[in-house]
Image (cartoon, helix red, strand yellow):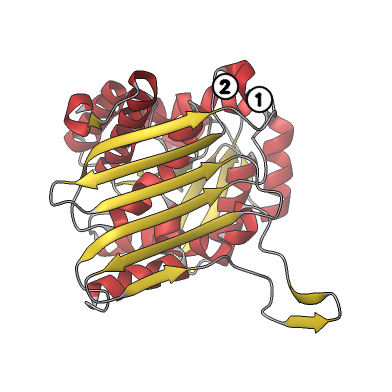
């Protein structure tokens, strides 16, 4: 039996998820909704589904699950609404920009016994998952150092950025989640530097575009994250895990691995240019994992609590930047 999805929000990420559902066994997109009717209709035409309203989807008998891809400031309200309606819920990160509001939302999820999975798609990337598998198999020994490089080709449109909560809550939150995914214990302290230096207008909305973040766990394991909103050579996504027995790492993905050598030197294909192409398989795997957890009636992962944990790290990083000091996560929690 196929899990019947409704898509709430048909913008860029909504289209990514619609395509992932189309490729995933056991999933079908039956309806979509958007504040812009023409955007909803365009997606519906591509994916052969219906256009409806959120009110109608809430009571629809032929909808089992919703994917929330609306602007961030609508996420928590929609999670609560569809939890009470008995729908299975997949929500793009973050749940909300306020820690208190996230906690309130998760209380409703718990009270209604709702299924909620949060969209940290990088856990489902085959390369990143292979690094985690190497850790699980003991091939790197005890994890000691995690290095994460995440650089976007350019800053997002101002209209999006102003509602997204700043780079650390919008972009770096994926890196906070991957750090937790690769560690065997929680970070307890955060020290961060950040600035707006790319000249893309980020400073006009009081945001940053360049950051270095250091984290440590209670036992001394360390994480370093470097972010930039300007990467002229493509979408730079790399991780490395160093442990007591060895190291595992994931390099950037390229369309092909052919290398050409001539008088000018060695030349390889450029890396992927943005998340829609870099993480295509991850988005499909993510939907498959959600479908499986619903079918098996198991707890989804990443969960709402994972969403909260990543947001706490982002808040600690912002406090560190503002106060120019190391911040304990417990100060936020």
Q: Quadrant of residue 132?
A: bottom left
SS at mark 1 in the image: helix
SS at mark 2 in the image: helix
**Residue drawn at x 46%, y 26% as measured from the top left:** 74
Camera-nearest residue between 226 and 264: 264
Label 2: how many residues lie within 10 Å, few (<14), some (14-19) or many (20+)? some
Tell me whether circle 1 and circle 2 mark residues in contact (CB < 8 Å): yes
Give the residue at mark 1.
Answer: 158
**Residue drawn at x 57%, y 36% as measured from the top left:** 9
Quarter of the image with the C terminus is top left
- Res 145 visible: yes
**Label at residue 162:** 2
**Residue drawn at x 25%, y 57% as measured from the top left:** 183
Q: Is residue 251 above or below residue 103?
A: below
x and y, in percent, of residue 236 in the image: 58, 55
**Residue drawn at x 33%, y 52% as measured from the top left:** 179
x and y, in percent, of residue 213 in the image: 39, 40
Give the mark count. Answer: 2
Label 1: how many residues lie within 10 Å, few (<14), some (14-19) or many (20+)? some
Taking the view exactly as shown, the residue that stands out farthest to the right is 263
Q: Is residue 46 above or below residue 126?
A: above
Q: CA distance from mark 1 to mark 2?
A: 6 Å
Taking the view exactly as shown, the residue that stands out farthest to the left is 219
């Amino acid at each position: 039996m196929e899990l019947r999805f409704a898509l709430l929000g048909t913008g860029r990420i909504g289209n990514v998820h619609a395509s992932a559902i189309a490729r995933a066994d056991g999933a079908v997109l039956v309806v979509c909704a958007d504040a812009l009717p023409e955007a909803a209709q365009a997606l519906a035409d591509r994916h052969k589904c219906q256009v409806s309203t959120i009110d109608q989807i809430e009571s629809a008998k032929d909808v089992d699950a919703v994917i929330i891809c609306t602007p961030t400031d609508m996420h928590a309200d929609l999670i609560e609404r569809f939890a009470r309606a008995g729908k299975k819920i997949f929500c793009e990160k973050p749940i909300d920009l306020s820690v208190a509001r996230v906690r309130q939302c998760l209380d409703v999820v718990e009270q209604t016994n709702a299924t909620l999975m949060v969209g940290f798609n990088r856990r489902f990337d085959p390369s990143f998952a292979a690094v985690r598998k190497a850790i699980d198999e003991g091939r790197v020994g005890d994890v000691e150092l995690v290095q994460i490089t995440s650089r976007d080709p350019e800053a997002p449109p101002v209209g999006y950025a102003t509602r997204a909560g700043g780079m650390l809550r919008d972009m770096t939150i994926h890196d906070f989640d991957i750090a937790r995914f690769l560690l065997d214990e929680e970070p307890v302290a955060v020290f961060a530097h950040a600035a707006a230096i790319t000249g893309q207008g980020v400073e006009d909305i009081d945001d940053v575009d360049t950051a270095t973040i250091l984290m440590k766990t209670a036992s001394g394991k360390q994480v370093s994250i470097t972010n930039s909103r300007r990467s002229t050579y493509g979408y730079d996504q790399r991780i490395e895990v160093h442990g007591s027995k060895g190291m595992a790492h994931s390099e950037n993905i390229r369309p092909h691995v052919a290398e050409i050598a001539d008088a000018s030197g060695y030349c390889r294909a450029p890396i992927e240019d943005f998340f829609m192409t870099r993480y295509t398989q991850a988005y499909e795997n993510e939907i498959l994992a959600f479908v499986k957890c619903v079918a098996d009636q198991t707890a989804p992962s990443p969960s709402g609590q994972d969403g909260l944990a990543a947001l706490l790290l982002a808040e600690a990083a912002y406090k560190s930047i503002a106060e120019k000091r190391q911040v304990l996560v417990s100060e936020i929690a």
